[in-house]
């Protein structure tokens, strides 16, 4: 197991950086530790991106599978126009640096992807939000992926969330954000992913930015989606905030106004952090 990165992870060190770099190349189980062309790093334009192309061409069967997935994702997430909210597995890893030590992206599909995250991006922690059926659909050998992560001394934490399911996301966010905060505050460099990196993973990043990054919800949402074009479920983050701070029942949240729990006072944020970290 390799040591965690030594640089300070104070909240000041984790604050938003405007000159962001876009990078590339879905029960808890843990192992302890529009612009640039492909192959280039973005320089200041938050919509720039870089992807690492896969060696294999996309077969007709794989293309049909991706098309079905994107159609289902667009419909179930309520996106009127799926572009650019689409997953293209043949392009390989597609990810963006959200803060200095938090990276949000698509699923690693091979041992080589894990090696790339470790060697090129200095990732020490992987947070995987996928269900087993996600691996099956895309033909990803998770056990091989996990084995390589262990061999490299990386921490791997699985926190499965049902794809496209706002209530599953709502239930899962507190534990995931607690995992992110623990890794980041210890000096880790975290890669969090679902399948496409367009729903579950960015929602978790936004929740962390909202709860621990001294931002209001819409500010955090806007900042992340300017870096990484995506459309995560805002209401699931509000609902998870409500669950942590409001004494009323689960279903009563749905009768509240759309801006309820989209804002936190300093006292409420402190109370949320204490309550969340106390659960660990």
Image (tube, rainbow, N blue to C red):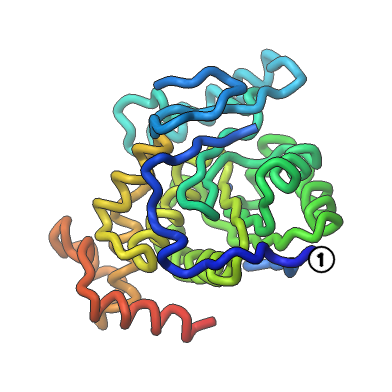
Q: Residues within 10 Å of mark 1 (few under 14, many from 20)?
A: some
The residue lying toward the viewer, choosing from 251 and 183, is 183
Q: Is residue 234 above or below residue 138?
A: below
On the rendered image, what quadrant is the N terminus found in? bottom right
Q: Is residue 192 left or right of residue 11?
A: right
Visible in this render: residue 118? Answer: yes
Quarter of image, res 256: bottom left
Q: Secondary structure at mark 1?
A: loop
Q: Residue at x 82, y 55 (%)?
A: 152
Q: Position of residue 278 (x, y in %)?
A: 47, 86
Residue 77 in sight = no
| Quarter of the rendering occupied by the C terminus | bottom right
Q: Residue at x 47, y 80 (%)?
A: 277
Q: Is 237 positioned to the left or the right of 185 in the image?
A: left
Residue 72 image offset from top left, x and y in percent: 46, 32
Farthest-out residue, left? 257
| Residue found at x 48% / y 29% | 42
> Percent x, y for residue 117?
69, 44
The residue beneath circle 1 is 1
């Amino acid at each position: 197991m390799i040591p965690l990165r030594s640089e300070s992870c104070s909240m000041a060190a984790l604050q938003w950086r405007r000159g962001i770099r876009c990078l590339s190349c879905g029960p808890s189980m843990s192992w302890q530790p529009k612009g640039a062309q492909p192959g280039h790093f973005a320089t200041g334009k938050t919509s720039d991106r870089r992807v690492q192309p896969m060696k294999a061409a996309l077969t007709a069967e794989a293309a049909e599978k991706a098309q079905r997935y994107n159609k289902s994702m667009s419909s179930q997430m309520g996106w009127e126009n799926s572009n650019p909210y689409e997953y293209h597995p043949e392009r390989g890893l597609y990810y963006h640096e959200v803060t200095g030590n938090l990276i949000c992206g698509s699923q690693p599909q091979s041992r080589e992807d894990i090696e790339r995250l470790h060697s090129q991006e200095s990732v020490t922690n992987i947070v995987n939000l996928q269900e087993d059926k996600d691996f099956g659909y895309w033909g990803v050998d998770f056990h091989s992926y996990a084995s390589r992560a262990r061999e490299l001394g990386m921490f791997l934490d699985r926190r499965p969330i049902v794809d496209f399911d706002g209530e599953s996301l709502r239930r899962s966010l507190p534990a995931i954000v607690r995992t992110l905060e623990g890794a980041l505050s210890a000096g880790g460099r975290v890669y969090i992913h679902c399948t496409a990196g367009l729903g579950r993973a960015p929602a978790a990043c936004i929740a962390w930015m909202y709860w621990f990054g001294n931002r209001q919800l819409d500010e955090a949402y806007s900042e992340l989606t300017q870096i990484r074009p995506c459309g995560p479920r805002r209401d699931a983050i509000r609902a998870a905030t409500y669950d942590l701070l409001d004494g009323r029942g689960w279903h009563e949240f749905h009768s509240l106004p759309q801006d309820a729990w989209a804002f936190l006072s300093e006292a409420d944020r402190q109370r949320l952090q204490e309550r969340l970290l106390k659960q660990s």
